[in-house]
Amino acid sequence: MIITADYHTHTNYSHGKGTPEENVLAAIEKGLRRIAISEHAGAHLFYGVRGNHLLRLRREVDALARRYANEIEVLMGLECNLIAAGKCDAPLPGTGIPEGADLAPFDVLLLGYHKGVWPEDAAARGAFRESFGLGHADPVKVAEALLQTAERYKIGMLSHPCEYVQADIPTLARGAKELGILLEINASHVSMTPAQIREAASYGAKFVIGSDAHTPARVGDFEKAIRAAEEAQVETRIVNAENAD
């Protein structure tokens, strides 16, 4: 299986170790056709990219897209954080983006649950407690919260499902199919087991493989995710693979 695009990479704008250009150059070296720089959105207490920093990143990614247009497609992504059912930190009016900033549309919007975000409702508080080993959230409510939010913000991918907190796979997969949202098989965390991936596929979900790279050397490193996908026998349901349906 050959993966042609990496939609989940981080840089030194958040908690990565390389620059956006270093990620792009690494992707070119790996033979990828497409790369997204997809930093954490602003609600993440430790790694969120917000305000003028996000605007500067947007401009840098746009410049890289022009510079390397003959070698690779460079996209502006954002990994948004679940705050409550139906709410994340995608930049909308009133979320700290400078007045008149030209940030939309993003090329790629991911949504996931992360520990460094303060929860605002019961579903997110349950996830917060589970992520710190303080209890168990209702996996159906977690899945529903992600789907409600993804629908409202037009999210394209759910990043590392079941990382930190479990989500009900049938609920998540059926909703993802209905909304046209991809489930990420994350090569850094491999947050779903092959059995969960196989179950999600049985409900019609499609997948995307992402490196979740935090260094340029990890861009395009999909080995663990490919192994999980092959064990689950879902190769033809991975949209950024050459052999996808």
Image: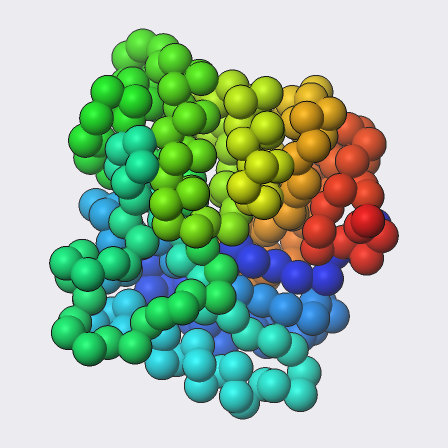
Residues 32 and 89: in front is 89
Residue depicted at x 20% and y 35% = 118
Residue 186 visible: no
Q: Position of residue 180 (x, y in %)?
A: 58, 45
11 vs 156: above or below: below
Look at the picture and state if 146 lies above or below 107: above
Which residue in the rendered view is the most extreme toward the top?
A: 135
Using the image as rendered, state which of residue 101 and residue 126 is in the foreground.
101
- Looking at this rendering, what residue extends furthest in the front direction? 178
Q: Residue at x 49, y 82 (%)?
A: 64
Q: Say whether residue 163 is left or right of residue 94.
A: right
Location of residue 138 (image quadrant): top left
User: Image quarter for residue 90?
Assistant: bottom left
Q: Is residue 150 visible from the viewing direction of this image?
A: yes
In this rendering, the count of numbered labels is: 0
> Residue at the location (65% across, 47% down)?
209
Where residue 168 sits in the image (x, y, percent)? 51, 19
Asked whether 239 or 131 is in front, the reply is 239
Identify the residue shown where x is 27% and y is 59%.
Answer: 91
Which percent across, then down, holds residue 208? Answer: 64, 47
